[in-house]
Image (cartoon, rainbow, N blue to C red):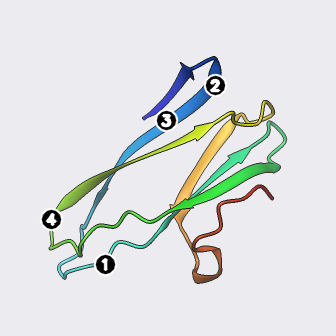
Amino acid sequence: DVQHLLVDGRSVIAIKGELANVSQTIRKIPWLRFGLRSSDGTEVYRWTLDTEVRPLKSGESTSFVTRLASPPEAARNLEIRFARADEIGSNMAP
């Protein structure tokens, strides 16, 4: 779920989602990576989120929320995936 908000005169996007363990074993939840892309597919901003969730048992789920103030005007699409080790903690523009 993506919401476009106006907070103190600034544009903010809020992204809410749910992660579920569909495997048969306990799983640690990796960091999430978010990327905003322009209409031509160029990534214009990226950030990561540590869900800080304990490992999930089989069938368990958890939710997450992240917000970004003043997203780039060129942003048209959102990509969410699990972060690679070299991306963890990288909250920066490309």
In space, the residues marked 1 and 2 are separated at their CA atoms by 33 Å
Residue 59, labelled with which disc? 4
Element at label 3: strand
Q: Earlier in the sequence, mark 1 or mark 2?
A: 2
- Between marks 4 and 3 in the image, the one whose residue lies nearer the viewer: 3
Q: Amino acid at mark 1?
A: Lys
Local packing at callout 4 (Cα closer than 10 Å; few below 14, some 14-19, many 20+) is few
Local packing at callout 3 (Cα closer than 10 Å; few below 14, some 14-19, many 20+) is some
- Between marks 2 and 4 in the image, the one whose residue lies nearer the viewer: 2
Q: Amino acid at mark 4?
A: Gly
Q: Amino acid at mark 3?
A: Ala
Does 45 sit above or below residue 56?
above
User: Residue 48: percent from the left, percent from the top?
Assistant: 56, 61
Q: Earlier in the sequence, mark 1 or mark 4?
A: 1
Image quadrant in which the C terminus is located: bottom right
Q: Earlier in the sequence, mark 3 or mark 1?
A: 3
Element at label 4: loop
Would residue 47 be found to the left or right of residue 57 on screen? right
The residue wearing badge 3 is 14
In space, the residues marked 3 and 1 are separated at their CA atoms by 24 Å
